[in-house]
């Protein structure tokens, strides 16, 4: 008995014509044969290749060193492109011309600028502003310490109105690299005259105040002239030119040398009444002996204090003042 039954089609219409199909003709097509593993791998590889060709390639991970090297190379390339720019070359040439012009202008100004002339310009400044190198140094060394360090020296110079190349000036003054400068470094002749004269007075009289009244201003006039200094130099047995010593000590507008011009610190003590006692005449022998002992002790103390005040330490006083020749 046949099992093929007809299939009733839809009603006949212009859109849907009647189709009579058998059950056998309407059955599904046979399935394809199952794929073996090799075919599966090949198929997957083809699909991966299609995906790789269609998707953009991601960069591989780089190390920190490679990243820094790449950035440096990019910066070098950028700078090389900038340097080759025509506008930059023009600006560089213009800046070079401007720097050369400013340098020439500074050099022209330095010719008349005392601050650019080192030690000689500094001495000229002191001479013009204060009338003498000694008075100018005393204005710089306002605390009368005798020596100044670099920072103290620069601050004091600016305070009195001197400006310039302080490093150059310091290198010319501090030749021994001691770290300090004194009047001897500024002007060796002026420093030698002042040091020799005062050290001799301290050795003989123990104190500059006693030396002033007993050796220099014997007549208590308050001001001495060149002959009085000549007698004092002769009395001390010094090989100094009295006229030069007088010009060094005398102020610019003064007709003579006063105690203030001789030593400002001694003048201050004199005005304050702190001078050492001077031996009086016609006293009993016992009292005179006691005064001599007290005076000798006081003179020794005053001598040490004067040396420390003048040179800073007793060792420096010995090397620079007492035993200058070694």
Image (spheres, rainbow, N blue to C red):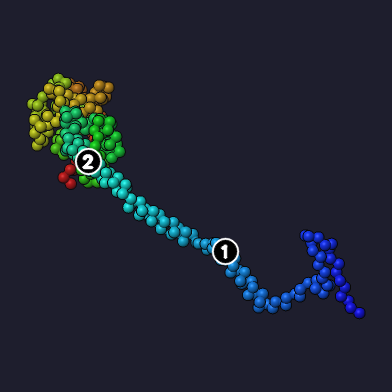
Query: Residue drawn at (27%, 22%), measured in percent from left and top?
Result: 272
State which tag comes first along the sequence, 1 or 2. Answer: 1
Q: Residue at x 17, y 35 (%)?
A: 112
Q: Nearer the viewer, residue 237 or 295?
A: 237
Per the image, the residue denoted by label 1 is 54
What SS does tag 1 mark?
helix
As rendered, which of 86 and 28 lies closer to the eye? Answer: 28
Residue 318 visible within the image: no
Q: What is the quadrant of residue 193 in the picture?
A: top left
**Residue visible at 55% across and 61% down in the picture:** 56
Q: Is residue 152 left or right of residue 105?
A: right
**Residue at 25% of width from left, 34% of height from top?**
163
Residue 173 position in % (x across, y down): 21, 41
Q: Position of residue 186 (x, y in %)?
A: 19, 38
Q: Decide: is 163 above or below 18.
A: above
Q: How many marks?
A: 2
Label 1 and label 2: CA atoms lie apart by: 65 Å
Residue 319 location, x and y as percent? 21, 43
Q: Nearer the viewer, residue 154 or 25?
A: 25
> How many other residues sit within 10 Å of disc 2, few (<14), some (14-19) or many (≥20)?
few
- Please identify the quadrant where the N terminus is shown: bottom right
Q: Nearer the viewer, mark 1 or mark 2?
A: 1
**Residue 154 image-quadrant placement:** top left
View extreme (bottom): residue: 1
Does the rendering let one see residue 310? Answer: yes
- For label 2, the residue is 101
Indicate the secondary structure of the residue bearing disc 2.
Answer: helix
């Amino acid at each position: 008995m046949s099992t093929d039954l007809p299939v009733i089609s839809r009603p006949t219409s212009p859109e849907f014509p009647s189709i009579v199909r058998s059950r056998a003709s309407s059955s599904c097509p046979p399935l394809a044969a199952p794929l073996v593993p090799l075919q599966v791998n090949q198929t997957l590889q083809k699909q991966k290749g299609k995906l790789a060709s269609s998707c953009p390639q991601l960069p591989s991970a780089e190390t920190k060193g490679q990243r820094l090297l790449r950035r440096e190379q990019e910066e070098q390339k950028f700078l090389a492109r900038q340097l080759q720019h025509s506008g930059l070359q023009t600006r560089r040439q213009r800046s070079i011309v401007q720097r050369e012009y400013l340098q020439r202008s500074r050099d022209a100004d330095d010719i008349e600028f005392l601050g650019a002339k080192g030690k000689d310009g500094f001495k000229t400044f002191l001479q013009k502003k204060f009338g003498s190198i000694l008075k100018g140094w005393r204005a710089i060394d306002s605390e009368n310490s005798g020596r100044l360090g670099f920072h103290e020296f620069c601050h004091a110079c600016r305070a009195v109105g001197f400006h310039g190349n302080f490093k150059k000036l310091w290198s010319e003054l501090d030749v021994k690299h001691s770290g300090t400068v004194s009047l001897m470094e500024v002007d060796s002749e002026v420093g030698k005259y002042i040091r020799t004269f005062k050290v001799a007075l301290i050795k003989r009289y123990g104190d500059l105040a006693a030396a002033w009244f007993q050796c220099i201003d014997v007549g208590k006039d308050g001001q001495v002239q060149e002959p009085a200094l000549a007698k004092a130099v002769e009395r001390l047995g010094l090989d100094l030119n009295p006229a030069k010593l007088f010009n060094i000590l005398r102020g610019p507008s003064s007709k003579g040398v006063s105690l203030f011009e001789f030593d400002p610190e001694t003048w201050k003590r004199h005005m304050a009444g702190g001078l050492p006692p001077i031996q009086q005449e016609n006293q009993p022998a016992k009292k005179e002996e006691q005064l001599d002992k007290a005076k000798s002790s006081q003179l020794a103390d005053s001598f040490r204090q004067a040396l420390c005040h003048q040179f800073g330490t007793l060792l420096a006083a010995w090397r620079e003042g007492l035993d200058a020749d070694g």
